[in-house]
Amino acid sequence: MNKLPALSLKPLAAILILFSLFCTACSETPERFFDIAILNTNMINDFASADLARHIEDETKEYPDIPSSKKKGDEAAISINNKILYLEQSLEKVKKLSASGEEEKQIKALSQQLYELVIPVYKNEYLAYAKLCDSKGSRAAKDEMIKNIAEKYGARFEQNFNALMEKGKTYAREHNIQVNWGK
């Protein structure tokens, strides 16, 4: 004869409720998902643009009448290396997101693709550009590098970025997330 006590429904129901609460707590809120997958990409919205090139070059500017503006000669490279670290951390956060629905899966994939497109360019082309700026390289060489980046990656970046933003706008509307889209 079986001497194991039979489980009543109350403890079983309590276990199921706790399990469902645990699973719910593991997934991100729509706001957190939006912040990580979409909002963090603001750091790269100037990718493959003249604005980004100007910002990098501005890291090397010195002003004769301002002694504190004296540069060591590696400021632009340090700035790019810091941005690379930030982007790599952002990518890891995107990879760890739990995407519950099809829409979130698509947003997560687009965000991940965007970071995976730009990070190698920052590590290679933009870091080389920054070093050229730090060493006071020629204007022609700098312009050529920026032109090559724009031609090689600009259209693909813009397409991926715009696709993510369109999905993001829909997601924000559906989840009542207040966003200023720069209008």
Image (cartoon, rainbow, N blue to C red):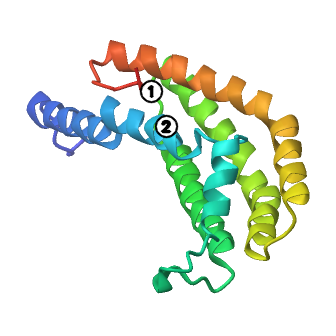
Identify which amino acid the numbered label 2 is placed on.
Ala
Q: How many marks are shown on the rendered structure? A: 2
Q: Quarter-wise, where is residue 34 in the image?
A: top left
Residue nearer the viewer, 13 or 143: 143
Residue 100 badge? 1
- Callout 1 crowding tier (Cα within 10 Å): few <14, some 14–19, many ≥20: few
Q: In the image, 137: left or right of 157? A: right
Residue nearer the viewer, 140 or 160: 140
Q: Quarter-wise, where is residue 130 in the image?
A: bottom right
Please give the name of the residue rendered at 73% of the width and 56% of the height, measured from the top-left corner: 122
Disc 2 to disc 1, how far (Cα)? 13 Å
Q: Position of residue 141 (x, y in %)?
A: 90, 58
Label 2 residue SS:
helix
Classify the position of the C terminus by image quarter: top left
Q: Position of residue 49 (x, y in %)?
A: 70, 40
Classify the position of the N terminus by image quarter: top left
Disc on the earlier residue, 2 or 1: 2
User: Of tags 2 and 1, which is closer to the observer?
Assistant: 2
Residue nearer the viewer, 40 or 146: 146
Please give the name of the residue rendered at 63% of the width and 39% of the height, measured from the top-left corner: 112
Against 87, residue 138 (above or below) is below
Identify which amino acid the numbered label 1 is placed on.
Ser
- Callout 2 crowding tier (Cα within 10 Å): few <14, some 14–19, many ≥20: many
- Farthest front residue? 65
Tell me the residue that label 2 is attached to: 37
- Farthest left residue? 10
Residue nearer the viewer, 104 or 172: 172
User: Is residue 102 something one can see in this rendering?
Assistant: no
Against 125, residue 137 (above or below) is below
User: Is residue 78 something one can see in this rendering?
Assistant: yes
Please give the name of the residue rendered at 59% of the width and 35% of the height, measured from the top-left corner: 111
